[in-house]
Image: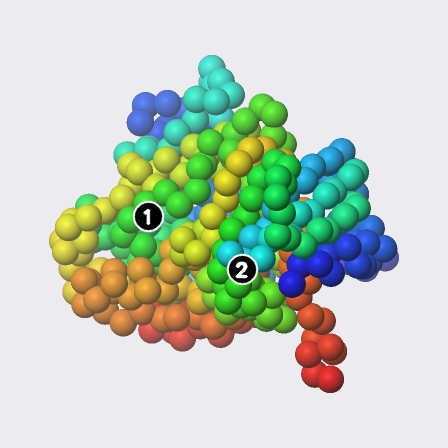
């Protein structure tokens, strides 16, 4: 029987992050300019499968997606305990830089969604000369809590069910149901307290105020794309961020918080022109 | 507005499986009207329309009628497509013991969304 093979290959490696060893899993495809993709809170690198399979992108870009520690196929560190995971800005930056240095990537493009869309702003502030370009999907400078995130990790509530329920609503009603289901499924498979632990960065530690003004688009080009159905990082919030940086934002119709996985076909229409500019 | 939740239980067989251990009563308020919904083993057993004298329920969802109308469109606009989106816009209020709601969040989202008209119905 002939099967249809995908061009994606996966690998494990040990990376030192802030002095501690982590076993990280990543997938990649294509060749050329390194494009490192960062998944959303509580999910994993599977969100970028459409990019890893997109022939047009793979001709010019080496697309690389890693699972953050504690997520997907990446392991928690030695002596980890359930309930003590909390993503800090420092740890998030350190894992990205350790991964890039570990793979000896020179001036990669980094694209992140949601928490990834926030951390690229921190990268732009702290290391503008290290990147060829930065792409923020669903980026906002800060987010005040609008629901009680303690529901995401309670022993009397199934974590997969509630995290999936939260993720489902963040997608557009117009996105294909099968892609929405798979996006939700990734959330249903997260470890206990991991989504909530990531949101510590998203809603508290990683909030950026006036520091946004330090971003210099001439040192490192930044592109911001946000789905119209996202109520977590709304297009209005991305617009305000883009105005402060002095760039245009791209509002994507018919997608929500997870453009790359909930409606890849629609998302790629917006991403291709951006990548063309970068290459 | 929400009276028809009692209909189409058969079409919601799959949904009921997602809440097979859920027994609860909740109130939906449009400010003008109230609807008391009783659920047994994930199946809507009764929907009563107010006004009520002493209604007994576990939790309550309150939004103005016009916001519920926007939510119930075939393809709702951004911000009206999900109850948490409405919560974020501060047009919907969750009150009471939220345990049944949050432990069956997707079930309740899909239950309410099941009242949206199908595309074919919209075209007719």
A113 or A132, which lies in front?
A: A113
Q: Position of residue A114 (x, y in %)?
A: 41, 51
Label 1 environment density (alpha carbons within 10 Å; few <14, some 14–19, many ≥20)? some
Label 1 sits on residue? A143
Asked if both marks, 1 and 2, belong to the same chain, the answer given is: no
Where A249 falls versus A214 (above or below)? Answer: below
The numbered disc on residue A23 is none
Total marks shown come to 2
Q: How is the image coloured?
A: rainbow
Going by the image, does A24 lie left or right of B101? left
Q: Quadrant of the N terminus of chain A?
A: bottom right
Q: Quadrant location of residue A225?
A: bottom left
The chain containing the residue under callout 1 comes to: A
Residue B55 located left or right of residue A260: right
Element at label 1 = loop
Residue pictured at 73% horizontal, 60% vertical: B4
Classify residue A72 by image quadrant.
top right
Nearer to us: label 1 or label 2: 2
Q: Which residue is label 2 attached to?
A: B32
- Mark 1 near mark 2, Cβ–Cβ under 8 Å? no
Q: Is residue B109 above or below residue A149?
A: below
Describe residue B21's horizontal placement relative to residue A118 as left or right: right
> Residue A118 at x, y = what percent?
32, 50
Residue A7, horizontal then vertical, whole percent:
61, 57
Q: Quadrant of the C terminus of chain A?
A: bottom left
Q: Nearer the viewer, residue A106 or A232?
A: A232
SS for callout 2 = loop
Question: Could you tell me if residue A37 is visible in this image?
Answer: no
The chain carrying label 2 is B
In the image, taking residue A86 as reference, residue A183 lies left or right, namely right
What is the distance, in whole Å, between disc 1 and disc 2 at their CAs? Answer: 33 Å
Instruction: Look at the picture and state if B114 lies above or below A104.
Output: below
């Amino acid at each position: 029987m002939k099967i249809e093979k995908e061009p994606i290959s996966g690998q494990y490696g040990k990376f030192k992050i802030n002095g501690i060893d982590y076993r990280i899993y990543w997938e990649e495809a294509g060749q050329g300019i390194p494009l490192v993709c960062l998944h959303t809170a509580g999910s994993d690198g599977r969100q970028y499968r459409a990019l890893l399979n997109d022939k047009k992108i793979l001709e010019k870009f080496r697309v690389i997606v890693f699972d953050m520690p504690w997520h997907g196929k990446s392991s928690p560190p030695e002596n980890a305990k359930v309930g003590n995971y909390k993503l800090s800005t420092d740890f998030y930056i350190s894992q990205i830089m350790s991964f890039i240095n570990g793979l000896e990537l020179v001036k990669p493009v980094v694209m992140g969604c949601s928490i990834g869309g926030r951390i690229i702003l921190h990268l732009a502030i702290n290391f503008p000369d290290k990147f060829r370009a930065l792409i923020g999907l669903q980026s906002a400078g800060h987010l005040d809590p609008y629901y009680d995130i303690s529901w995401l990790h309670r022993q009397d509530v199934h974590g997969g069910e509630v995290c999936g329920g939260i993720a489902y609503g963040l997608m557009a009603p117009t996105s294909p149901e099968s892609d929405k289901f798979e996006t939700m499924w990734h959330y249903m498979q997260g470890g206990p307290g991991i989504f909530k632990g990531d949101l510590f960065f998203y809603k508290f530690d990683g909030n950026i105020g006036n520091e946004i003004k330090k971003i210099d688009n001439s040192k490192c080009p930044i592109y911001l794309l946000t789905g119209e159905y996202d109520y977590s990082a709304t297009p209005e919030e991305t617009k305000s961020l883009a105005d402060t940086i002095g760039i245009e934002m791209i509002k994507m119709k018919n997608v929500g918080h997870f453009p790359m996985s909930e409606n890849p076909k629609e998302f790629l229409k917006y991403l291709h022109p951006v990548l063309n500019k970068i290459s | 507005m929400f009276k028809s939740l009692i209909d189409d239980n058969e079409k919601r067989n799959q949904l009921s499986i997602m809440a097979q251990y859920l027994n609860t009563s909740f109130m939906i308020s449009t400010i003008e009207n109230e609807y008391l919904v009783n659920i047994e083993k994930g199946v809507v057993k009764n929907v009563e329309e107010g006004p009520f004298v002493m209604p007994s329920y576990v939790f309550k969802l309150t939004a103005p009628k016009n916001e519920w109308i926007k939510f119930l469109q075939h393809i709702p606009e951004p911000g009206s497509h999900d109850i948490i989106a409405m919560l974020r816009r501060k047009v919907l209020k969750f009150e009471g013991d939220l345990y049944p709601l949050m432990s069956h969040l997707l079930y309740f989202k899909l239950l309410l969304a099941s009242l949206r008209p199908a595309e074919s119905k919209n075209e007719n």
